[in-house]
Amino acid sequence: MESSISSVVVARVAFLMMGFTMLITLACTIYIDGSPFRAALLTPWMNATLIDFYLNVAAIATWVCYKESTWIGAFTWTVLLICFGSMTTCWYIATQLFKISSQDPLYFVLLKERHARWLSSEISDPCEIP
């Protein structure tokens, strides 16, 4: 008997696991090494890492603002992205994966619900979708 696991289900599990891995990594690092806000850590590599991080946050926050239906939701997720980085990214993607059917194509997670429904319908104008 052949088992068919949906790519959406696999992605849900993967992103939840990555989010929890980052949570555990962050907690252990803070416990073992203490606060990350120390002068000893302010090196040129840290500057490059922070610039890289915040450019990624800007790109992901743009997608989050597109996906969220309210500005409060978009603002809340953006603040969480700034504060907790990849852990929030993984959890946001996982929550979006739980909003689509396990039978939907995986790329639907990238789209607003209305646009995903438009792609799977015969309607020629996405504005006609309620």
Image (spheres, rainbow, N blue to C red):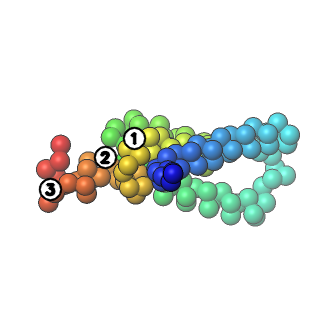
Residue visible at 51% across and 51% down in the picture = 1
Give the labeled residue for mark 1: 99
Residue visible at 54% across and 42% down in the picture = 91
Residue 106, position as x, y percentages in the image? 42, 55
Within 10 Å of disc 3 (Cα), the crowding (few <14, some 14-19, many 20+) is few
Indicate left or right for 35 with 55 as reference: right
Secondary structure category for the residue under label 1: helix
* Residue 85 visible in this rendered orientation of the protein: no
> As rendered, which of 2 and 71 lies closer to the eye?
2
* Residue 114 visible in this rendered orientation of the protein: yes
Give the labeled residue for mark 3: 123
Q: Give the amino acid at mark 2.
A: Glu
Q: Give the amino acid at mark 3.
A: Ile
Up-down relation of residue 98 to residue 61 (above or below)? above
Residue 73 sits in which quadrant? Answer: top left
Residue 34, position as x, y percentages in the image? 83, 39
Q: Give the amino acid at mark 1.
A: Lys
> As rendered, which of 100 and 3 lies closer to the eye?
3
Residue 126, position as x, y percentages in the image? 19, 54
**Would you say the residues marked 1 and 2 are in contact, meaning their CB atoms lie under 8 Å apart?**
yes
Sequence-first disc among 2 and 3: 2
Q: CA distance from mark 1 to mark 3?
A: 22 Å
Give the labeled residue for mark 2: 113
